[in-house]
Amino acid sequence: MAVGELGLDVSDAVRVLNRVFGYDSFRGAQQEVIDHVTAGGDALVLMPTGGGKSLCYQIPALVREGVGVVISPLIALMQDQVDALRALGVRAGFLNSTQQAYERRQVESAFLTGELDLLYLAPERLRVESTGSLLDRGMISLFAIDEAHCVAQWGHDFRPDYLALSALHERWPTVPRIALTATATKATHAEIASRLNLLDARHFVASFDRPNIQYRIVPKNEPKRQLLELLRTEHAGDAGIVYCLSRVSVEKTAEFLVHNGIEALPYHAGLDAPTRAANQARFLREDGVVMVATIAFGMGIDKPDVRFVAHLDLPKSVEGYYQETGRAGRDGLPSTAWLAYGLADVVQQRKLIDGGEGDDAHRRRLATHLDAMLALCETVECRRGQLLAYFGQQATACGNCDTCLSPPESWDGTIAAQKLLSTVFRLSRERRQKFGAGQVIDILLGKKTPKVTQFGHDCLTVFGIGTELREGEWRGVVRQLLAQRLLAVEGDYGTLVLTDSSSEVLRGQRQVLLRREPERVAPATPKTSKPRRAAPVDLPEVAVPMFEQLRAWRTAVAKEQGVPAYVIFHDATLRQIATECPSTLAELGTVTGVGENKLAKYGQQILDTLTGSAPVTPSTATAIRDTENPDQ
């Protein structure tokens, strides 16, 4: 879609926004960024997932003369990104290692003849001289460096090939560059600017707040069953991502969900490439699929209707946690970020750091990241406020996280801490022995287990001095002392040892405030039948049947075209259509997300669906039947 075809001048970004993308106005700093880049300026943009980063380079690429070159690490997703743009009428293509030679030649020819608006490249491809020669022979409107945090050495997705991107300005000095990322602390922000040679660029830092996401962290108590309860009660039939630390845990969790009627798929590096690609394609292209994955999955996922992201293991850093949870609710609709967290997570992460590769400085850096993550888990204040503070931004209590909705109690745990630390002291200093949390807690509770009596621990002066707390509460004390570095773990068996700060507590020189542990309630025994889809949130009840009819139509069209359903229309657009029920193409054209190309392509089909006069094809009939009978 060339500028001339739309009759646009260089400053008419708003008309592109409306006519191509179907939106009436820009959000936040979008227009400021777009105007700056369109005028030829360099930019570094920090904007949350779902904040509309892609428009910040797509619109300047459409308005400026030439082809916008997008550097993206997401080879597996380039086809879907290009399909989504083509559905809007934008001339887009990509070059990567998945293509046949004739396919690459077609894209290269289109680039050289000016028949492309956007060209997607993997960073590895830019290191091939033939790619540089190709770009030299065409007209480039801009360079967009997506997922720019990949350049950060200590970031969560470091890609060495990104380091070479600093040379873009040297080879093409007149071409503006825009680097974009969704997560960066001040230190990571500075490193991105330095490594990409963008110190003189204009920096745009939007609020990282995602108010539509509800953040919740719960104590672990049979986490797979807790997850199943969440899906059944709040997210039946919804698409979502479940993150686990290990491949084994991914496989077992996916099997557990499938056994209990949830459409779930595994994704981890141990699967062969075709299986990973097939599972990712199903997640992107089908409604209501749950992906159970290691953190190898998800970067750059464009699926807008991910309604929840769940973690069954503790993330290693707040940056990683924020980016992973940010894959929920890209469409701005209510979504959930849920994390189950327990003592074993703390012990495991500390062991991974102590036994990991790298020098002492690297381990200290990892420990600092973990400390920040633990602080987020243990806070009694607003989680969103703590999360934003980590990125250097301020916020008032949000009213949409678990600590705001059900404020936890804090209590003076100094005496409890002294009792527990004294027990560790007695074992390590008097008996020259080291044990894990289970043995220490059994001693405090006065349990004469075979292991306690075998080692004579029932004769210790601390035996039975902690009966005022339940076992679960003592585990919470241990976890929080580890989080506050008043206690440490060492060795392969996670034995407890004192720290330099422990003596301050034992001598009564330091108060210890703890978060009160909730009463542990056993999860309900799950049913094995497939859960019925929940009614869409924030949709009038009278509009629900039409919304489902529109979803069925969209599913059929997407299947026929071989593209993800969201490439046709986002859920948010279908909700608005179902609520407003436009009766003419002109009225339909005012709906957010309905641009000129989609209006011409799908407008009459939507109106026919609204009036019930749409022809029923076999694929449409199947989609409608599956929607009406979710248990079958």
Image (cartoon, rainbow, N blue to C red):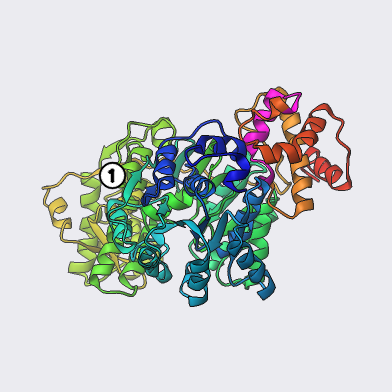
Q: Residue at x 39, y 44 (%)?
A: 36
Is most of the magenta stretch helix, strand or loop?
helix
Image side of residue 622 versus residue 311, left or right: right
* Closer-to-camera residue (132/629): 132
Residue 236 counted in the magenta span: no
* Closer-to-camera residue (225/303): 303
Report which residue position mark 1 lands on: 392
Specify the segment rendered in magenta: 566-585
Q: Is residue 406 visible?
A: no
- Residue 398 location in percent, x, y? 39, 32
- Residue 160 location in percent, x, y? 40, 71
Considering the numbered disc 1 on the image, is that residue within a helix, a strand or a loop? Answer: loop
Q: Label 1 is placed on what type of residue?
A: Gly
Q: Is residue 64 visible?
A: yes
* Closer-to-camera residue (303/592): 592
Q: Residue at x 20, y 51 (%)?
A: 418
